[in-house]
Image (tube, helix red, strand yellow):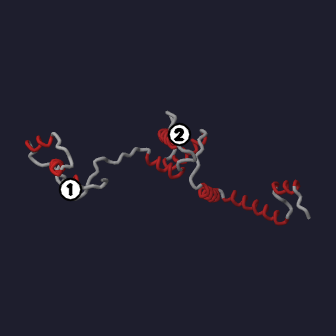
Amino acid sequence: MAGSRTQKIGSVFSRTRNLVRIGIMEKPLWLDVYAAFPPLREPLYRVPRPRYGRVTDAIPPILYREDQERARFYKVYGNGPRPFDLTQLNFKSTCQRFIEKYNELKEEGKIEEEKLFEETGKALLASGIILQRKGTDKVAQQEQQGAASRDPALHLQLQTVLEELQEKRKDGEEQPPELAGTQKENPSPS
């Protein structure tokens, strides 16, 4: 039985002795020896006492120096589009490459601690490893807002160009090249 509690009632000796007495079980060899030389204290199941006070864990948490950067990497970039390929013996995940580059740039000491995470991402991009952020739409909006605050003249210039294009489309003077090419190929019947 999967949840039977009979092992908790009595000892192995008393349970076996009762099974032999009823006739369910043949008498094992050790039963007479145990009866002749019983232990000083009969082995019984006892419910463990609850410990009062704070129970301390015997194993302390194991944290490495790069665990904070690794957690930040997974928060910003996620696991990536593909699963890990563990069939290769010398496989390094994108996160591990990021951490190695991060530690390398940190040892150089040329970059400030606040900018180190972003600079590591740029360095990996320069070496050919593409990192894709989670929620790229939100990141793109933040970058646009950041660009506007950095250079207001550029933002104003882009805004005027956009307004001019919208006015021209309204007037019908200029169509986008994609639409102009499709209308020449497929003229609509009038």
Q: Residue furthest top?
A: 89
Relative height, residue 149 to residue 94 (above, below): below
Q: Is residue 30 left or right of residue 129?
A: left
Q: Earlier in the sequence, mark 1 or mark 2?
A: 1
Q: Quadrant of residue 35?
A: top left
Nearer to us of marks 1 and 2 is: 1
Q: Nearer the viewer, residue 52 or 96?
A: 52
Q: Residues within 10 Å of mark 1 (few under 14, many from 20)?
A: few
The CA span between labels 1 and 2 is 48 Å
User: What residue appears at the point 20 percent right and 56 percent down from the top-left corner?
Assistant: 49
Can the viewer see residue 146? no
Q: Quadrant of residue 29?
A: top left
* Callout 2 amino acid: Asp
Badge 2: how crowded within 10 Å, few (<14), some, or many (20+)? few
Q: Nearer the viewer, residue 121 or 12?
A: 12
The residue at the point 22 percent across, 52 percent down is 7
Q: Residue at x 44, y 44 (%)?
A: 66
Specify the amino acid type for callout 1. Answer: Val
Q: Residue 85: which disc?
A: 2
Q: Note whether 73 is above or below 91 in the view shown.
A: below
Residue most toward the front?
A: 23
Residues 32 and 9: in front is 32
| Quadrant position of the C terminus in the picture | bottom right
The image position of residue 57, as x and y in percent, is 29, 50
| Secondary structure under the numbered disc 2 in the rendered image | loop
Q: Position of residue 164 (x, y in %)?
A: 79, 62
38 versus 143 height, above or below: above
Q: Which residue is mark 1?
A: 47
**Whole-percent x and y of residue 24?**
21, 49
Q: Is residue 125 left or right of residue 112?
A: right
Label 1 close to label 2 by CB (< 8 Å): no
Label 1: which secondary element:
loop
